[in-house]
């Protein structure tokens, strides 16, 4: 079956899909993106993802390439053509094509829109054995709240993690605090059973999965504190886990080679993954 991509107004064969060499996304990473999970043919948290896309665009003063309604239509059409049941939709908007100059183009250019889909296996409630993370210095810029395609520090951190046998990198700031993962948000559970995740500000991406899980925690009356936590605190935590549109809730059982808690998947991560999987099916965060 041919797989399609959407490129600037056309549905094209994914293998042939291409953009102009002077697309500012390609030359200057002058663009933003979103990744929306798909489960059972339905988008997970579509509205919040598109709201975040809107915010990223506004922060960088990039216009919408099509209306919000049209984007919704394109997403569904691409999912239909690619028979996407479980997986993700990737969408990217760049400032457009212009003669190379760091400053914005002085004549109006149309923002460029590209969408692809990816099939993944059906994510199950069972956590599996959990994953290892490796700490890496957070060398990113001061606007990590914007979901830009400028991801080189994340790429290098993830690669360092993978080369050490870990699944994800945990980024550590100058104060020794874990900000987030290379492509996930980071959480711990303290010895007292309190959930901790860093507050959202310019230092991290305000994850949509993180946000939904916060509502789930509220409905379960779990104690959640949004504050910085150090790598040392994480290493002594009872449990740890990561969240994202593609990993849902995934337990972390090892940090820099040391076991978290007893080194096994904890009850809290297990429970929250079950709840999030249920949400991904029903769209309801309240149990
Ligand atoms: N990454 N932090 C960073 C740096 C991310 O790149 C992501 C998402 C998250 C989690 O956000 P959300 O829950 O909205 O997926 C946190 C996507 C999945 C990616 O780049 O592929």
Image: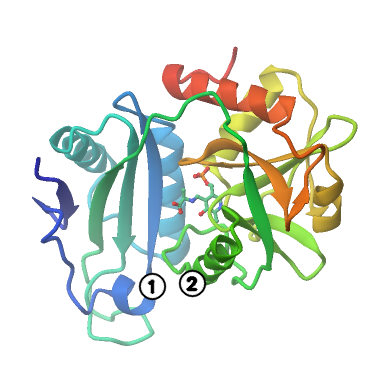
Near mark 1 (Cα within 10 A), the count class, few <14, some 14-19 or many ≥20, is some
Position of 155 with respect to 76 (left or right) is: right
Determine which of the numbered discs, if any, sits on residue 66 in the image: none
Please name whichever residue, 145 or 149, is drawn nearer the observer in this view of the structure: 149
Mark 2 sits on what residue? 152
Residue 278 location (% of width, % of height): 51, 18
Determine which of the numbered discs, if any, sits on residue 29 in the image: 1
Distance from Cα at disc 1 to Cα at disc 2:
10 Å
| 159 in relation to 245, above or below | below
| 154 in relation to 67, above or below | below
Residues at badges 1 and 2 in contact (C-beta under 8 Å)?
yes
In the rendered structure, which disc, 1 or 2, sits on the residue that comes first in sequence? 1
Residue 238 location (% of width, % of height): 82, 37
Near mark 2 (Cα within 10 A), the count class, few <14, some 14-19 or many ≥20, is few
Could you tell me which residue is drawn at 31 percent across and 51 percent down?
Answer: 91
What secondary structure is found at the residue carrying circle 2?
A: helix
Quadrant occupied by the C terminus:
top right
């Amino acid at each position: 079956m041919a797989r399609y991509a959407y490129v600037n107004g056309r549905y094209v064969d994914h293998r042939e899909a291409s953009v102009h060499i002077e697309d500012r996304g390609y030359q200057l990473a002058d663009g933003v993106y979103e990744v929306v999970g798909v489960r059972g043919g339905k988008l997970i948290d579509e509205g919040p993802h598109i709201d975040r896309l809107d915010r990223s665009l506004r922060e960088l003063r990039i216009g919408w390439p099509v209306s919000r309604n049209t984007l919704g239509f394109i997403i569904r059409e691409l999912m239909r053509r690619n028979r996407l049941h479980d997986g993700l939709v990737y969408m990217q908007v760049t400032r457009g094509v212009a003669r190379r100059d760091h400053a914005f183009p002085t004549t109006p250019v149309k923002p460029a829109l590209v969408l692809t889909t990816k099939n993944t296996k059906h994510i199950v409630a069972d956590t599996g054995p959990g994953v290892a993370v490796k700490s890496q210095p957070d060398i990113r810029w001061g606007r990590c709240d914007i979901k830009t395609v400028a991801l080189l520090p994340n790429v290098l951190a993830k690669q360092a993690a993978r080369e050490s046998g870990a699944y994800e990198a945990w980024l550590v700031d100058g104060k020794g605090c874990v900000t987030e993962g290379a492509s996930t948000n980071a959480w711990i559970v303290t010895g007292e059973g309190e959930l901790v995740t860093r507050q959202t500000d310019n230092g991290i991406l305000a994850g949509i999965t993180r946000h939904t899980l916060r509502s789930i925690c509220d409905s379960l009356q779990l104690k959640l504190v949004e504050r910085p936590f150090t790598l040392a605190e994480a290493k002594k935590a009872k449990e740890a886990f990561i969240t994202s549109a593609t990993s849902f809730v995934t337990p972390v059982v090892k940090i820099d080679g040391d076991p978290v808690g007893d080194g096994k998947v904890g009850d809290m991560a297990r429970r929250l993954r079950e709840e999030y999987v249920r949400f991904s099916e029903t769209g309801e965060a309240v149990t």
